Amino acid sequence: MRPGTRRPKLLDLFCCAGGAAVGYERAGFDVTGVDKEPQPNYPCHFVQADALTLDAAFIAGFDAIHASPPCQHYSDLAKRNGNAEDWPDLVDDTRTMLQATGKPWVIENVEGAPLRSPIVLCGTMFPGLRVIRHRLFEANFPIAQPHHIPHAEHPRCHTLDKRKGHYGKTCEWTDYVSVNGGGNCSVAAARDAMGIDWMTKREINEAIPPAYAEYVGRQLMRHLRGETHGKDRVKRAHTPLFEAACG
Ligand SMILES: C[S@@+](CC[C@H](N)C(=O)[O-])C[C@H]1O[C@@H](n2cnc3c(N)ncnc32)[C@H](O)[C@@H]1O
């Protein structure tokens, strides 16, 4: 930001312990999180509330909104277990609420969620991350899909499952890990792999790496500054990741 200009305010809905929040902070936003549960580890300003029934006057105080509604309903695990209906299905209601605000917004969720024309981010796209974690991002402003990463070629993931052929042949500190409820690595290795050093294992299972939100947040910042235009946008969509994000 230019000296003297204020940091734009971002409302981080369904914030949990703030993986997204830290990414948006790094992109230059002043972040406030909302979650229906207490979030003692949330690193920014926090409000405990239902994200879908917020007061319009409260929302009006923000420049942009990010929302990460719960993903369990759409997950592969719920489909395999046949219990998707045990979890809330909030993506469509969240989009309806965001559209009514008239603000720039982002919805993040897992593959299988009903997001419209989303981009897909994965830990393999970010130098320094070692996590295989696909997340979808839908927005009402242009966000670029990094096209230079071959997604078919995921590296081998560390496992604690003795039935897997590569059990015992990988290291959780140097190989990629998959951070999930099943516990395929220690919490310390999960933190290292995701670039998050403040969360419990339960919180980190729910989080996106801050690098994903920083990537989207930098493009949101450019949008707020009026810097994204047709031709420029297409060109940037095909440049390497951080060039696309940072210009
Ligand atoms: C997937 S987590 C969010 C992860 C977060 N974006 C991050 O990167 O760390 C979803 C969160 O939504 C919260 N939640 C579920 N329903 C909610 C509601 N109606 N209002 C506010 N928060 C809600 C849950 O408590 C949970 O913390």
Image: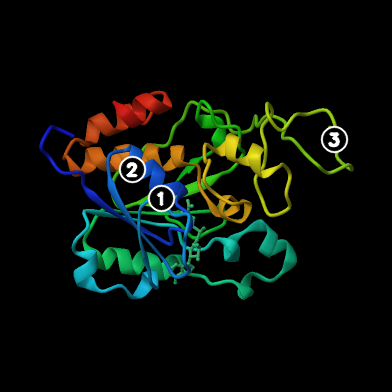
Mark in the foreground, 3 or 1: 1
Mark positioned earlier in the residue sequence (3 or 1): 1
Which residue was labeled with disc 2?
25
Q: Quadrant of residue 194?
A: top right
Number of residues whose C-alpha sits closer than 10 Å to that of mark 1, classed few (under 14), some (14–19) or many (20 or more): some
Residue at the image point whose x is 34% and y is 76% from the top? 53
Q: Nearer the viewer, mark 2 or mark 1?
A: 1
The x, y position of residue 176, in whole percent, is 66, 32
Examine the rendering and report whether any part of residue 112 can be seen. yes
How far apart marks 2 and 1 lie (CA) works out to 10 Å
Residue that mark 3 sits on: 167
C-alpha distance separating marks 3 and 2: 38 Å
From this view, report whether residue 92 is shown above or below residue 112.
below
At numbered mark 2, what does the secondary structure look like: helix, strand or loop? helix
Q: Position of residue 139 (x, y in %)?
A: 34, 51
Q: With 204 as the anchor, is 232 left or right in this view?
A: left
Q: Amino acid at mark 3?
A: Tyr
Q: Residue at x 19, y 64 (%)?
A: 60
**Whole-Å distance between the Cαs marked 3 and 1?**
36 Å
Of callouts 3 and 2, the N-terminal one:
2
Q: Is residue 118 visible?
A: no
Q: How is the image coloured?
A: rainbow
Q: Circle 3 — which element? A: loop
Question: Which residue is pictured at 64% across the width and 39% down the height?
Answer: 188
Identify residue type, mark 2: Glu
Task: Name the residue beneath numbered marker 1.
Answer: 43
Looking at the figure, which quarter contains the C terminus?
top left
Q: Amino acid at mark 1?
A: Pro
Rendered location of residue 229, percent (x, y): 20, 36
